[in-house]
Image (tube, rainbow, N blue to C red):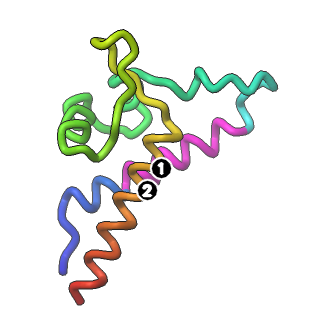
Amino acid sequence: MRPTKTDVRLARCADRLAEWNASQQGDEGGDGCPCRAVVTRKGLAGVLVVSVRTVDEMVAKGEITPMRPGGVLVRFYLPDVLRQLTAAAVARLEKMKGGL
């Protein structure tokens, strides 16, 4: 079974977010503030190197879950997004392996 575009996108986004997360570990400045890990749709799109529309599609498909402070605002907690994208990529990989 060949990987679909969604399979490839999920894996690529999980890799990019993991790389970003690793680069931020040494860049905390000692304060350990988790607020740097909360980003907007545009910020998440920048981290994942995708368009804002792609982020919206990922939310619509349930691939990632946003926080909604104040009801209208949409924010993403990067560790949660990393966990969700990694889990989705692993699940799709396992599904593909099962089809062989």
- Extent of the magenta region: 12-25
Query: Left of 27 or right of it: where is 18?
Result: left
Front position in the image: 7 or 59: 59
Position above or below: 99 against 8: below
- Residue at 32% in and 54% down: 10
Query: Left of 38 or right of it: where is 5?
Result: left
Within-10-Å neighbours for mark 1: few <14, some 14–19, many 20+:
some
Q: Quadrant of residue 48?
A: top left
- Residue at 46% in and 47% down: 16
Residue 83: which numbered mark, if any?
A: 1
Within-10-Å neighbours for mark 2: few <14, some 14–19, many 20+:
many
Assess whether mark 2 and mark 1 are in contact (beta carbons under 8 angstroms): yes
Q: Circle 1 — which element?
A: helix
Position above or below: 54 against 32: below
Q: Quadrant of residue 57?
A: top left
Position above or below: 39 against 47: above
- Residue at 81% in and 26% down: 30
**Position of residue 49 measured from the top left corner of the image (x, y, whole percent):** 36, 38
* Quadrant holding the C terminus: bottom left
The Cα atoms of the two marked residues, 1 and 2, are separated by 5 Å
* Residue carrying label 2: 86
Front position in the image: 79 or 9: 79
Dot 1 amino acid type: Arg
Dot 2 amino acid type: Thr
Q: Quadrant of residue 25?
A: top right
**Position of residue 8 measured from the top left corner of the image (x, y, whole percent):** 28, 60
Q: Circle 2 — which element?
A: helix
